[in-house]
């Protein structure tokens, strides 16, 4: 079964609109400021999507564009101003950044209560990506169990499944691994040092691939009925986006799989918006 992340996100946005109605009763409009450096087509497209989805639910999204010669110090000064702006509830620095930018300094400068991407060590927010992955797994669980909402059995189900996570990058597999551990779910990790990764993949009930390389997950390494989630994205020779597996090759093997594009991405943006609303709600109470 092909899992449409756009449908999952649409259901979340219905809930978000009601939360914004309640905030607007208090004269609060959730406001996200996104800082983007350079003109990377992928980054521009992703930031534009964030702006579009934010405005669709009634939030405000401001995009601040900087040329690639901007300095770390200039960005820090801007973030400091955004920190003290009462009308800004979320601050996001779009990655990747030029090599000369010290991303760690930007993370530490951002007010933790406005760091809705969850990179500051004191941020109360979880990176949207792992939230999106778990939300997709929750939807699979609900669909299979006929339940209408998450319940304790969902986490028990996750613990019982043989989960394999491929890749541990700082913006992909790493945050997914960290979040799963907070649920006491311990996946098998495959990285460049793993011995016999093929054996782990053949035994997996769920594979979360966060590599961004074509054919990372090969059909001959899958058991029938596996659940596949592709976090990794790569751009093929045809300039189109692809996931870590070829959908035509795995669609008759996997019980559920996310497509690329249209899988994890839309849910990722939705979870970012959820963090923004939570930030606005918390700041409204402070």
Image (cartoon, rainbow, N blue to C red):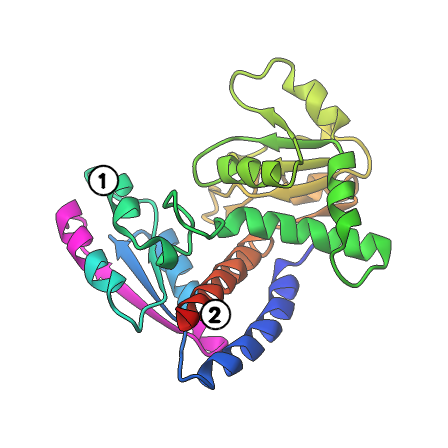
Quadrant the C terminus occupies? bottom left
Nearer the observer, 124 or 53: 124
The x, y position of residue 20, in whole percent, is: 50, 78
**Disc 2 and disc 1: Cα gap in Å?**
29 Å
Q: Is residue 130 left or right of residue 148?
A: left
Would you say residue 172 sits in the magenta stretch? no
SS type, badge 2: helix
Residue at label 2?
53
Q: Are marks 2 and 1 in contact (CB under 8 Å)?
A: no
Residue under the image location 77 percent in, 42 percent down = 156
Nearer the observer, 165 or 113: 113
Residue at label 1?
102
Quadrant of the rendered image containing residue 92: bottom left
Q: Compared to 112, does 255 lie above or below?
A: above
Q: Is residue 101 left or right of residue 52?
A: left
What range of the chain is rendered magenta?
A: 54-78
Residue 14: tell me if it is visible.
yes
SS type, badge 1: loop
């Amino acid at each position: 079964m092909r899992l449409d992340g756009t449908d999952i996100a649409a259901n979340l946005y219905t809930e978000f609109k009601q939360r914004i109605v309640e905030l607007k009763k208090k004269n609060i409009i959730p406001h996200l400021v996104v800082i983007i450096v350079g003109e990377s087509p992928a980054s521009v497209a992703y930031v534009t999507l964030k702006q579009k989805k934010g405005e669709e639910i009634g939030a405000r999204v401001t995009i601040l564009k900087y040329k690639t010669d901007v300095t770390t110090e200039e960005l820090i000064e801007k973030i400091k101003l955004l920190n003290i702006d009462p009308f800004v509830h979320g601050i996001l620095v779009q990655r990747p950044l030029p090599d000369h930018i010290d991303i760690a300094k930007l993370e530490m400068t951002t007010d933790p209560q406005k760091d809705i991407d969850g990179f500051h060590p004191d941020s109360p927010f979880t990176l949207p990506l792992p939230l999106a992955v778990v939300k997709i797994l929750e939807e699979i669980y609900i669909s299979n169990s006929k339940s209408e909402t998450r319940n304790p059995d969902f986490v028990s189900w996750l613990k019982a499944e043989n989960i394999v996570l491929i890749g541990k990058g700082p913006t992909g597999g790493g945050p997914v691994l960290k979040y799963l551990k907070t649920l006491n779910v311990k996946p098998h990790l495959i990285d460049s040092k793993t011995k016999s990764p093929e054996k782990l993949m053949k035994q997996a009930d769920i594979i979360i691939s966060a590599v961004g390389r074509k054919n990372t997950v090969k059909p001959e390494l899958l058991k029938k009925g596996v659940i596949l989630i592709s976090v990794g994205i790569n751009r093929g020779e045809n300039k189109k986006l692809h996931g870590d597996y070829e959908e035509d090759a795995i669609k008759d093997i996997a019980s559920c799989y996310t497509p690329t594009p249209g899988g994890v991405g839309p849910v990722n943006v939705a979870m970012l918006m959820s963090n923004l609303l939570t930030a606005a709600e918390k700041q409204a109470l402070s």
